[in-house]
Structure formats: structure tokens, C-alpha cells
Amino acid sequence: MVVKVIELVGTSSHNWKDAVDSAVMESSRTIDEILGVEITKFTANVDNGHIAEYKAGVKAAFKVKH
């Protein structure tokens, strides 16, 4: 089996978990058989002293088809 790893950034206006879910769900529309993810970074945009957008850096591993 050959596995490829790509880096993604997911976003959410609610929380970091939703940002990770967003990255996985969006990438799974075009990538089959995602095997797992590694969360590499949590960041956020701030507006008027409050978090406006949560961001999650994600590495996703998936099978490469032959």
C-alpha cells in the first residue's frame, strides 16, 4: 500500500473541532479513502477582541490507487 499525505486548513466560525471536520469533509469530496489526520496547528482570526474564525492545520493521509 502507498499512502500520500497532504496539508489542509479547515475553518469554522464556531470552534476548532468544526474547523478540523470542515477540512476532512471538504477534502473527502475529491479524495477517497482518507485513513487518518494529524492536527498540526490551531489559529484564529480576531475581530473586536473576539475570535471571528477558527482555523485548523491538518495533514490528511490517504491511499494512493494504482
Image (cartoon, rainbow, N blue to C red):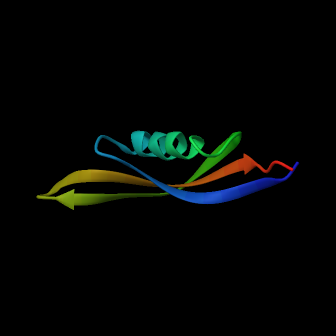
Residue at 59 percent of width and 41 percent of height: 28
Residue at 71 percent of width and 41 percent of height: 35
> Can you tell which quarter of the image residue 59 is in?
bottom right
> Can you tell which quarter of the image residue 49 is in?
bottom left
| In-image side of 48 versus 28 (left or right) | left
What percent of the width, then of the height, locates residue 29? 56, 41
- Total numbered circles: 0
Give the residue furthest to the left: 48
What percent of the width, then of the height, locates residue 9? 47, 56
Above or below for 19 versus 8: above
Which of the two residues, 48 or 21, is positioned nearer the viewer here? 21
What percent of the width, then of the height, locates residue 44? 32, 57
Which of the two residues, 19 or 43, is positioned nearer the viewer here? 19
Which of the two residues, 32 or 50, is positioned nearer the viewer here? 32
What percent of the width, then of the height, locates residue 38? 61, 51
| In-image side of 53 versus 59 (left or right) | left
Residue at 43 percent of width and 40 percent of height: 17
| In-image side of 39 versus 55 (left or right) | right
